[in-house]
Image (cartoon, rainbow, N blue to C red):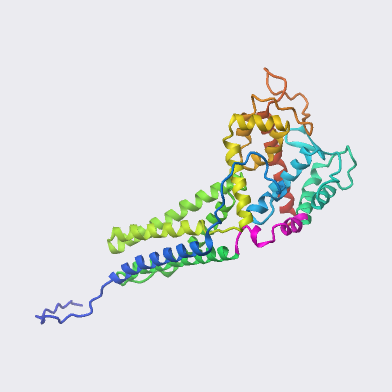
Amino acid sequence: NYGIALKARLSDGYWQGALNGDWAVQAMVILTAIIALVLLIMWFIGGRDPKIKRTPQTRPVDGVSPVEFNYVFNSEMNGRDLVRLILYFAINGYLKISEYEPKRYRLIRLNDPDGEEKLYRNAYNIMFEDVYKGRSIDMDDLGSRLVRIKNNISDDIAAGFSSKEMLAYTPLSRGFRIAGVVLVSACVTVINILKYSYQYISVNYFESIVLGLLTAGLLTAMCLADDTKYSSSDSNGRALELFSVIALAAIATYLAAGIIRQTGQIIIAIAVVILMAVSVFLIVIMRARGSGNAALIMRFRQLRRFIYHPTPKELLENQLADPGYFYDMMPYALTFGAEESWGISFLTLDVPEPDWYSDDIEGHAFSNLREQPTTLDYAHDLRSFWRTIENIYRDAARSMR
């Protein structure tokens, strides 16, 4: 149990092949740089949207019905499409919305949409099945009817966007994005392994694999949240995007701290984090649309810009040309979460009361100083209606599943 130290005088060049972990540091930078370069090439080849000229949009986009809105963006229908459908029926005189209790509504059947497309007629017949003209739908039955409407008209809507030019995702860009997620996640795993290899110590493979899987999940969540940010006013999507960014930043910080702790090279850690951030950015924007779809998306984005920042001249011109202009645009204002801004913009204009919406709550008063609701009041009322119907649909869909 005694230690013995041996000391000897050795000739020059005796020790060769000493352990040197610099190769691991170099591999980290080279790997992240190669992946960033590959993703950039992918983006140039098939991940970019076609270039579309920006033109002002101050009215609803022609050729796209409200129920098709989300399909233009994401090739799928959701509950908001069905709320837009109800508002479309109401604005065009096919039904009337009556709020008889707080967040309790009656949808009263009026004129049949005989001149509308088949999918509208089918949706209307399902909504008012066994309900006579002038009678209302029982709110307890509305959710199941909305689910049936979605299942019934989804194929008809999809048929209108089946051409290559109208695809919301080109197959090539979708494949490139998936490949990018795999590459960056694998890169995180390998970098975590390399930081241990630098000092020739035991590798924590479990930690490395978990970091890679977390990165893959967070990148997928970030892409989904970014894809729906224009077609949804839901704060959950923005919260998911923010959470994904923060969590990915935390993983990058953890990797950088490990690299510095194991190698002591701060510059290398910074370079790796920057290259990974570039790769993440390229993955998020790696979404190419068909030329026709890209043109529609550009018009919707210009419409969103106008709704948030209208000029008095444009508002007045459109309102004079169409007294129902404020209500025609309201489904899109609600979609973009700009209903309050839209309502405020019309406070000084002469906007008629809607004959398709009524507040029938007994004893309800808007203000002690005025007797008639303003455009801002209607914006708030319709937002409440929007959320109520959307929740009804979600509950029904969840129950059926």
Q: Is residue 180 magenta?
A: no
Q: Name the side, left or right, on which 400 lies relative to 212.
A: right
In the rendered image, the residue lying farthest to the top is 369
Image quadrant where residue 251 sits: bottom left
Where 384 sits versus 175, above or below? above
Instruction: In the rendered view, tell whether residue 29 sits above or below residue 65.
Output: below
Please tell me which residue lies in front, 395 or 387: 387
**Can you give x and y, in whole percent of width and height, for residue 4 in the image?**
16, 78
**Image spot of residue 269 (x, y percent):** 33, 59
- Relative side of 69 to 305, left or right: right
The span shown in magenta is 153-170
Residue at the (61%, 37%) spot, across then down? 307
Residue drawn at x 72%, y 33% is 322
Total label count?
0
Q: Is residue 219 left or right of residue 330?
A: left
Would residue 257 be visible to someone looking at this image?
no
Find residue 261 and report its horizontal and vertical position in percent: 30, 60
On-image quarter of the C terminus: bottom right
Residue 73, visible in the rendered structure: yes
Q: Nearer the viewer, residue 317 or 96?
A: 317
When the figure is inspected, residue 126 is found, relative to residue 351, above or below; the finding is: below
Q: Is residue 157 magenta?
A: yes
Is the N terminus in the top left, top right, bottom left or bottom right quadrant? Answer: bottom left
- Give the percent coordinates (x, y) of residue 203: 37, 70
